[in-house]
Amino acid sequence: MKKRGNYLAIVVLSVFLGLILSIQFKTIAKSVGEGILPTQRAQQLALELKKAQSDRDAQANRIEELESKIEQYEKGGVENNLYAENLYKDTMKYRILAGYVDLEGPGIILEINDPPVDVQYGEGYSIVDELDLILQVISVLNAADAEAISINDQRYTSFTEVVRAGNHIVINGVPVSSPIIIKAIGNPDTLESALAIKRGIVWQLRNYDYIVHLTQDKNISIPKYRKVKEFIYSSPVEETVN
């Protein structure tokens, strides 16, 4: 009987140890599965992102080449032809107005940085939460006859969207975060005065504790608008002769 009792005790102990080992194996397998798979997925996504960026850069370079050839053809066709030359100048003017031409010239640079984080409460706020202030800057620059405007190197046109998305904003489909750097080409004194006027937009930004730097620059570069706008529902109205 004693041997039988010892045998039962060993069996019970073995079953108990088996259950413990089984639980440990499942826990380890689960931990490994949760650790390795997301890592592999992250690596895969990183490779896909790198490939997409490479393809994007290749397409951008191709577009630059084609646009350069088009410009050569356009310029080549206007030589010794006054009508074609005037037509080319008008075309360039409207392309500039639409934002489809890289521009450079004198103007201003406005940099808006977030206020310092409140150490006591560990909280802060960002300029990306203040779309109305960003759009107000754009309105002031337009009123001051700015000839071209960009936000974080995204050309601002009549088709540009500025929308909030999570902890950043999207401009022309491109995510942008703080600091916000707005560049404008035009008369530097006029543009600076319009922004820095007493109780104007720069005063408002600083009053909200944003860190603002406003400077003039003799040679500002503003890139072209990259998105292609297609008109589907609208068409030009033909003029009628009375």
Image (cartoon, grey):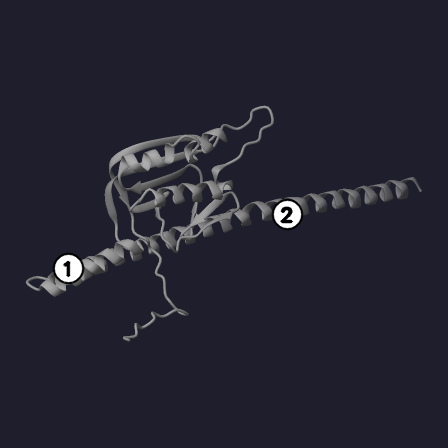
x then y, percent, for residue 9? 85, 41
Seen in the picture, residue 216 relative to 103 is either above or below; the reply is above
Q: Residues within 10 Å of mark 2 (few under 14, many from 20)?
A: few
Residue 139 point in image, percent of width and height: 40, 45
Dot label at residue 139: none
Q: Is residue 61 visible?
A: no
> Height in image: 90 above or below 115?
below
Residue 160 appearing in the image: yes
Residue beneath disc 2: 30
- Dividing the picture into quadrants, the one containing residue 96 is bottom left
Residue flagged by tag 1: what amino acid is it? Gln
**Disc number for residue 72:** 1
Percent position of residue 13, x then y: 81, 41
Nearer-N-terminus badge (1/2): 2
Pair 1/2: label in front: 1
Viewport quadrant of the C terminus: bottom left
